[in-house]
Image (cartoon, rainbow, N blue to C red):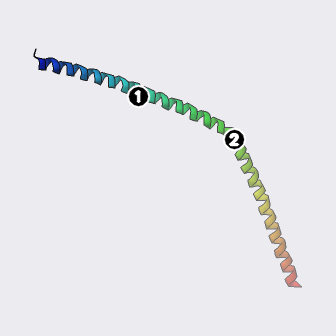
Amino acid sequence: MTKTQIASNSIDKVEQSVQAMFFRWGALGGVALLLGFVIEGIVLTAQVQGLDPRMRVVESRLERNCQLFDRLDSKVDEIRNDVTRLSTLNDER
């Protein structure tokens, strides 16, 4: 074997070693990324579950506000009818 062939073989071995190292790190990186996604999913699920009681309070307040708005709307209709009736009575005099 010549010095060139020995150097070429050494370079090939180093190259293969580096490729194997990158493959292992790439696989570990992929596993770490997948694990990160799983953890993020668990955290988001916990946050959403924590929002559920608050959403019930907001829904309750919204329902109450809608009922109040309906009452106010009926009162406005009553007042409008009274004004129309009084205006009609005044015009008849």
In this picture, residue 80 sits left or right of residue 48: right
Q: Eyeballing the image, is 87 above or below 8?
A: below
Q: Quadrant of residue 9?
A: top left
- Count of numbered badges drawn on the protein: 2
- Is 49 located above or below residue 1 in the figure? below
Give the residue at x 61% y 33%: 46
Disc 1 residue type (three-letter): Gly
Label 1 secondary element:
helix
Q: Quadrant of the N terminus?
A: top left
Q: Position of residue 67 (x, y in %)?
A: 77, 54
Within 10 Å of disc 2 (Cα), the crowding (few <14, some 14-19, many 20+) is few
**14 vs 37, nearest the viewer:** 14
Q: 40 or 9: which is nearer to us?
A: 9
What amino acid is at disc 2?
Arg
Image coordinates of residue 43 in percent, x first then y, are 57, 32
Residue sitting at x 84%, y 75%: 85
Residue 78: which quarter of the image? Answer: bottom right
As drawn, the residue found furthest toward the bottom would be 93
| Disc on res. 54 | 2
Front label number (2 vs 1): 1
Q: Quadrant of residue 82?
A: bottom right
> Up-down: is 42 above or below 68?
above
Query: Is disc 2 placed on a helix, strand or loop?
Result: helix
Give the residue at the far left of this rendering.
2
Relative horizontal placement of residue 11, taking residue 24 as reference (left or right): left
Q: Residue furthest front?
A: 3
Looking at marks 2 and 1 on the same chain, the residue that comes earlier in the sequence is marked by: 1
